[in-house]
Image: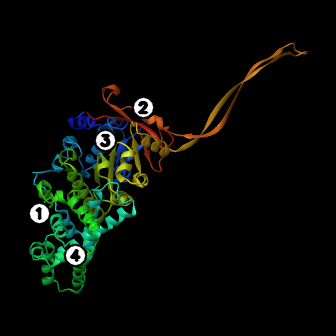
């Protein structure tokens, strides 16, 4: 066996037992097999299957990242897919570097990290690649609003919270439109300056000190001097009306909450390393993933904090928009978005993207510890509905060992119920002995009777997820999981539930 094949084997490129020679005898296109999940040839999992999206659930220590997650990642790398991967823990990038080396993709690696030279002005990128005019402004405002919403997980469920989100969107839209009309640089620091220096009340508008120091007023003046198009003049009048009349006249508490909601989220991008990465020129774009690059967002949350989380969400959403814009043919390169600790990065936008991801030849893999975590992140009174909506559009579910009741009950409901026969045995009480006068035989005593009746029962009981093998030396470095794919009955089990043993990567 060659060194390359041994490396693939070490990284767990097997579901149950996939001969490596068989990997070389693949079909081409989207029907190329990525994993063999049982000895039955029909139980292959293909590139086309990956485009349906995959949710991997399992408790901390269940082996989901180092077994099923690593296997899918390695198979996609071997298929020459472009990859975008987020990071939560320090050292996650090293795992991707090792997998890229093992699959011959080291030259495609881009480690997007502080000091790497890679920078991404996401708003400027959208200006250059999105639609023009007011449609561009609306798109940019939506992108900024989604970022603010991600900074307030669990919100948006009450009328008051929805009002604040709508207010943030309107404020961001007018700020971006004013910057565009003044022909200034569109980035988060400039948007923040406009919002911070907008007048707080009508008296401030007449203040000489405010007039001299307000970036908002400076841009209004610049826009007045350069705008001549009738449509742009209409937009400028709208901006002036908002910043000089509507915003100063708003209830002070409401205005302060709306402004602070935005500023608290955007502030981390206005200075330090994230200003360097996201508010200067652009050397990285999501298009590089479409061209086959393996991009690792190496500013893990555990090291760089909340702004790192928001920055990765921002790039993920820009990547989703980029994927949705590209023309697709049978020769279009597949792409993968791999999100470990997904509870940190999911947003309501994700289930909308996943609904059309298959036609975009885009695979999404979300790994998270529990359904409870997703419900909490997607929060509020509708958290369960939002989490299940996201899970519903991910056609593949892999459930490893879990002690979370929400996850175990989700798995039981997922695999549903089936008809089976339940046998019953009963022991009748003893009867008085009787002697047959013709034969002389004596009958009586206890009688045992058996019967079978149809019964509707869970195919996989919730408790079964609590005892699956979790890898390590205790389980021979093998991890067990139940595999579900929408619309599929597995040959090995003749049902929608397939218990798979994954080789763990160590």
Disc 4: which residue:
243
**Tag in front: 1 or 4:** 4
**Which numbered dot is residue 468?**
none
Disc 2: which residue:
467
Label 2 to label 3: alpha-carbon separation: 22 Å
**Screen quadrant of the C terminus:** top left
Answer yes or no: is residue 180 visible. Answer: no
Mark 4: give few (<14), some (14-19) or many (20+) Cα within 10 Å: many
Q: Quadrant of residue 279?
A: bottom left
Mark 2 residue element: loop
Q: Please report the residue visible at 69 percent of the width from the left and 26 percent of the height from the top.
A: 426
Label 1 to label 3: alpha-carbon separation: 36 Å
**Tag in front: 1 or 3:** 1
The percent position of residue 251, horizontal first and vertical second, equals 29, 70
Disc 3: which residue:
71
Mark 4 residue element: helix
Q: Please report the residue visible at 36 percent of the width from the left and 35 percent of the height from the top.
A: 17
Label 1 to label 4: alpha-carbon separation: 29 Å
Give the mark nearest the N terminus, 1 or 3: 3
Q: Image height check: is 272 above or below 58?
A: below
Label 1 to label 2: alpha-carbon separation: 52 Å
Q: Image height check: is 436 above or below 116?
A: above
Give the mark nearest the N terminus, 4 or 2: 4
The percent position of residue 93, horizontal first and vertical second, equals 19, 44
Please say if the residues under marks 1 and 2 sit with CB atoms less than 8 Å apart.
no
Q: Please report the residue visible at 21 percent of the width from the left and 62 percent of the height from the top.
A: 263
**Tag in front: 4 or 3:** 4
Mark 1 residue element: loop
Q: Nearer the viewer, residue 10 or 173?
A: 173
Q: Nearer the viewer, residue 19 or 268?
A: 268
Q: Image height check: is 391 above or below 501?
A: below
């Amino acid at each position: 066996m060659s060194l390359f094949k041994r490396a693939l084997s070490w990284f767990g490129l097997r579901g149950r037992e996939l001969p490596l020679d068989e990997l070389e005898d693949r079909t081409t296109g989207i029907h190329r097999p990525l994993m063999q999940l049982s000895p039955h040839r029909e139980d292959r999992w293909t590139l086309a299957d990956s485009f349906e999206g995959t949710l991997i659930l399992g408790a901390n220590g269940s082996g989901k990242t180092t077994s099923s997650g690593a296997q899918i990642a390695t198979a996609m790398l071997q298929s020459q897919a472009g990859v975008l991967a987020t990071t939560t823990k320090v050292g996650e990038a090293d795992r991707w570097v090792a997998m890229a080396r093992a699959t011959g993709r080291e030259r495609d690696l881009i480690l997007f990290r502080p000091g790497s030279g890679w920078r991404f002005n996401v708003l400027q990128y959208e200006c250059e690649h999105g639609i023009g005019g007011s449609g561009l402004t609306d798109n940019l405002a939506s992108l900024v609003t989604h970022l603010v919403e991600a900074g307030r997980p669990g919100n948006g469920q009450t009328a008051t919270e929805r009002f604040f989100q709508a207010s943030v969107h309107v404020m961001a839209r007018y700020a971006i439109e004013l910057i565009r009309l003044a022909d200034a640089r569109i980035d988060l620091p400039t948007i923040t300056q406009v919002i911070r220096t907008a007048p707080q009340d009508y008296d401030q508008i007449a203040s000489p000190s405010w007039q001299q120091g307000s970036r908002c007023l400076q841009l209004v003046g610049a826009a007045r001097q350069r705008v001549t198009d009738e449509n742009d003049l209409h937009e400028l009048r709208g901006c002036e009306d908002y910043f000089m009349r509507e915003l100063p006249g708003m209830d002070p508490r409401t205005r302060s909450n709306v402004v602070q909601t935005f500023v608290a989220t955007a502030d981390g991008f206005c200075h330090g390393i994230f200003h360097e990465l996201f508010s200067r020129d652009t050397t990285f774009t999501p298009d590089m993933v479409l061209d086959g690059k393996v991009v690792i967002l190496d500013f893990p949350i555990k090291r760089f904090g909340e702004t790192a989380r928001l920055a990765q969400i921002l790039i993920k959403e820009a990547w989703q928009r980029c994927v949705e814009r590209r023309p697709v043919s049978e020769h279009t390169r597949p792409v993968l978005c791999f999100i470990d600790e997904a509870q940190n990065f999911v947003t309501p936008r994700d289930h909308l993207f996943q609904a059309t991801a298959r036609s975009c030849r885009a695979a999404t893999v979300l790994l998270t510890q529990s359904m409870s975590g997703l419900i909490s992140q997607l929060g509020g009174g509708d958290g369960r509905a939002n989490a299940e909506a996201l899970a519903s559009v991910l056609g593949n579910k892999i459930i490893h060992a879990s002690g979370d009741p929400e996850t175990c009950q989700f798995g039981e409901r997922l695999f549903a119920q089936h008809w089976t026969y339940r046998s019953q045995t009963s022991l009748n009480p003893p009867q008085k002995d009787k002697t047959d006068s013709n034969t002389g035989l004596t009958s009586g005593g206890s009688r045992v009777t058996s019967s079978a009746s149809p019964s509707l029962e869970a195919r996989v009981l919730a408790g079964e997820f609590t005892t699956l093998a979790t890898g390590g030396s205790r389980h021979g470095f093998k991890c067990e999981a139940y595999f579900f794919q929408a619309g599929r009955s597995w040959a090995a089990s003749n049902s929608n539930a397939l218990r798979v043993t994954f080789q763990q990567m160590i």
